[in-house]
C-alpha cells in the first residue's frame, strides 16, 4: 500500500522513465514511436490527435526545414568565428533569434508528441493504477499540445501592424425603427462595459441620439491592441426580441451596423487640402442657444473617394473640424489597408470579419437566451453576460482562433511561411 501511495505521488515523467527501464513497456516499440515522432511529427493511427492537429503535414515539413537551418546557424555561431565579419555575425544572430521564435516552441511540441506516445503505450499496461495515472497525465499533455500548436500558429502568421493600434468604433441603427436605435444603445453599453474590463479609454467623437435611442455614434477607443481585438466586430448585428413598446408580445427583428477602423494617429496618410470640400452649418439637437445659432457643425468630403464625415459634437467649429479629420483619416487608412489586403489575398478567395460584409454577422436572440456568430457558426446561451460585456471575450476568442486557422490553411506553399520579423 505504501508503495502504491508513493506511486501515485510521483511525477508521471519519472514514472515513464522508471517503467521503461523496468521493462513494463516494450523498449524497442517505445523507441520506434519516439523516433517516428521526432523525424515525422505525426502521432500513430488511432491517437486522439491523429487527423485533428492544426498543423498540416506541409507545415510540419516547413518547420523541420526551419529547425535544420536554425541548428546550422547555431553550429556556426558556437564554432570558430575568428574569421567572420561583424556584419555576418549580426546577420546570423538576427536569423537565429527570428527562427528561434518558431523553432523553440516547435521542439517543445516534438517532446510533447513523444511523451504522448509513451503515455498511450502505458495505458495498455497491466497495472490499473499505472493506467489511471497515464490517462490523467495524457489529458494534461494533450492540453499542452494544443497550447504549443497555438503558440506555433501565432508565431507563423504574418503580423498586421494595424492590430496593435487603437480603433475608431462606429455604431449605427439599421432596420427596425426605434427598436433599432434602442439596440444601437445596447451595443454601445456592451462595448463600454467590455472596454472597462480591458481598461481601455473611450472618447465620444460624434453622436446622434434622442434619450436612449441612438441613431449613430462614433467612438475613439484607446489602448494597447484595441483594433486587433475588436476588428471582428464589424458587420451587421441582428436582435430578435419583444420590444418594450410591443403590447401583443410579438418578436421583432432589428439590426445595427458596427464598423471598426484602425486609428490612423501615427500613420502617414496624405490628404491634400485641395481634395477636400468643407461645409459648415448650424448644429441641430439639444445644447442651448449657442448650438443652434452658430455655424459650428462641420462636414468634410474627400472629393476623389467620395468619403464624407461630419461632426457637430463640440461647440467649436475648429474642434469639430479636428474630430472630423481624425475620422476621415481613419476611413481612408482602412480603405487603403483593405485594398492592399484584398490584393494580397485575391488568390485565396477568403475573407473573414470584414466590415464590408452585407449579411448578418451575429444574432442576439433574447427569447432563447442565445447569441450566435454566423461567420463561425458559434452559439452561446448567455445573453445577459454578452450584453454586459463579460462574455464578449468568449466570442472574440473563437473568431480569432478561426481566423488564425484559416490564415494557416491558406498558406499553400512554403514561401507563405517565414520567420517573424522582430
Image: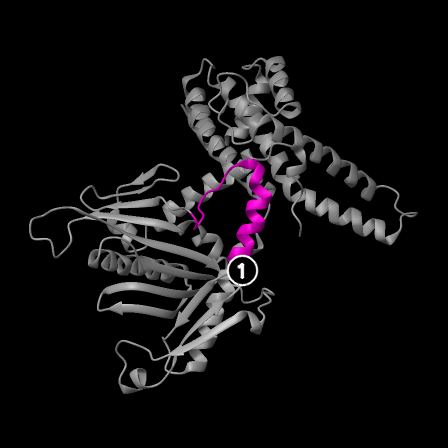
Q: Is residue 323 above or below residue 165?
A: below
Residue 6 in view of the camera: no
Residue 57 image-quadrant placement: top right
Residue 381 image-quadrant placement: top left
Q: Quadrant of the N terminus?
A: top left
Residue at image location 55% in from the left, 51% down from the top: 339
Residue 221 appears at what percent x and percent y? Answer: 43, 64
Which region is colored magenta? 333-356
Residue 408 image-quadrant placement: top right
**Residue 354 is one of the magenta-drawn residues:** yes
**Image-based side of 39 in relation to 379, left or right:** right
Q: Residue furthest left?
A: 248
How many labels sit on residues?
A: 1
**Image-based side of 303 in relation to 106, left or right:** left
Q: Is residue 328 above or below residue 81?
A: below
**Residue 96 is one of the magenta-drawn residues:** no
Crowding at label 1, few (<14), some or many (≥20) Cα neighbours within 10 Å? Answer: many
Residue tagged by mark 1? 333
Residue nearest the observer in this picture, 341 or 392: 341
Residue 421 appears at what percent x and percent y? Answer: 67, 50
Amino acid at each position: 500500500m505504501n508503495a502504491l501511495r508513493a506511486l501515485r505521488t510521483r511525477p508521471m515523467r519519472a514514472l515513464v522513465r522508471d517503467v521503461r527501464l523496468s521493462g513494463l513497456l516494450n523498449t524497442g516499440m517505445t523507441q520506434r514511436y519516439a523516433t517516428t515522432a521526432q523525424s515525422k511529427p505525426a502521432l500513430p493511427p488511432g491517437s486522439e490527435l491523429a487527423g485533428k492537429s492544426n498543423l498540416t503535414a506541409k507545415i510540419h515539413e516547413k518547420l523541420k526545414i526551419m529547425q535544420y537551418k536554425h541548428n546550422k546557424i547555431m553550429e556556426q555561431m558556437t564554432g570558430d568565428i575568428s574569421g567572420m565579419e561583424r556584419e555576418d555575425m549580426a546577420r546570423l544572430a538576427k536569423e537565429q533569434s527570428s527562427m528561434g521564435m518558431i523553432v523553440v516552441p516547435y521542439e517543445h511540441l516534438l517532446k510533447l508528441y513523444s511523451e504522448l506516445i509513451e503515455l498511450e503505450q502505458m495505458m495498455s499496461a497491466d497495472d490499473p493504477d499505472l493506467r489511471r495515472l497515464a490517462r490523467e497525465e495524457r489529458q494534461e499533455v494533450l492540453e499542452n499540445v494544443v497550447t504549443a500548436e497555438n503558440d506555433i500558429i501565432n508565431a507563423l502568421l504574418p503580423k498586421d501592424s494595424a492590430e496593435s493600434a487603437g480603433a475608431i468604433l462606429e455604431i449605427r441603427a439599421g432596420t427596425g425603427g426605434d427598436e433599432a436605435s434602442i439596440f444601437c444603445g445596447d451595443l454601445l453599453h456592451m462595448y463600454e462595459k467590455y472596454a472597462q474590463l480591458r481598461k481601455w479609454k473611450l472618447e465620444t467623437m460624434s453622436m446622434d441620439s434622442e434619450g436612449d435611442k441612438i441613431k449613430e455614434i462614433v467612438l475613439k477607443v484607446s489602448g494597447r491592441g484595441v483594433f486587433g481585438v475588436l476588428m471582428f466586430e464589424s458587420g451587421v448585428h441582428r436582435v430578435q426580441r419583444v420590444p418594450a413598446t410591443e403590447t401583443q408580445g410579438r418578436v421583432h427583428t432589428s439590426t445595427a451596423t458596427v464598423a471598426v477602423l484602425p486609428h490612423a494617429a501615427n500613420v502617414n496618410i496624405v490628404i491634400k487640402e485641395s481634395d477636400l470640400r468643407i461645409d459648415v452649418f448650424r448644429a441641430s439637437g439639444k445644447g442651448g442657444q449657442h448650438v443652434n445659432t452658430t455655424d459650428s457643425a462641420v462636414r468634410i468630403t474627400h472629393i476623389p473617394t467620395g468619403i464624407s464625415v461630419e461632426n457637430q459634437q463640440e461647440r467649436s467649429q475648429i474642434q469639430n473640424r479636428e474630430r472630423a479629420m481624425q475620422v476621415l483619416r481613419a476611413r481612408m487608412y482602412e480603405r487603403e489597408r483593405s485594398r492592399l489586403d484584398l490584393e494580397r489575398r485575391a488568390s485565396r478567395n477568403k475573407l473573414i470579419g470584414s466590415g464590408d460584409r452585407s449579411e448578418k454577422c451575429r444574432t442576439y436572440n433574447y427569447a432563447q437566451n442565445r447569441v450566435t456568430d454566423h461567420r463561425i457558426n458559434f452559439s452561446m446561451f448567455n445573453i445577459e453576460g454578452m450584453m454586459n460585456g463579460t462574455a464578449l471575450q468568449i466570442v472574440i476568442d473563437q473568431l480569432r482562433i478561426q481566423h488564425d486557422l484559416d490564415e494557416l490553411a491558406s498558406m499553400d506553399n512554403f514561401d507563405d511561411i517565414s520567420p517573424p520579423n522582430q
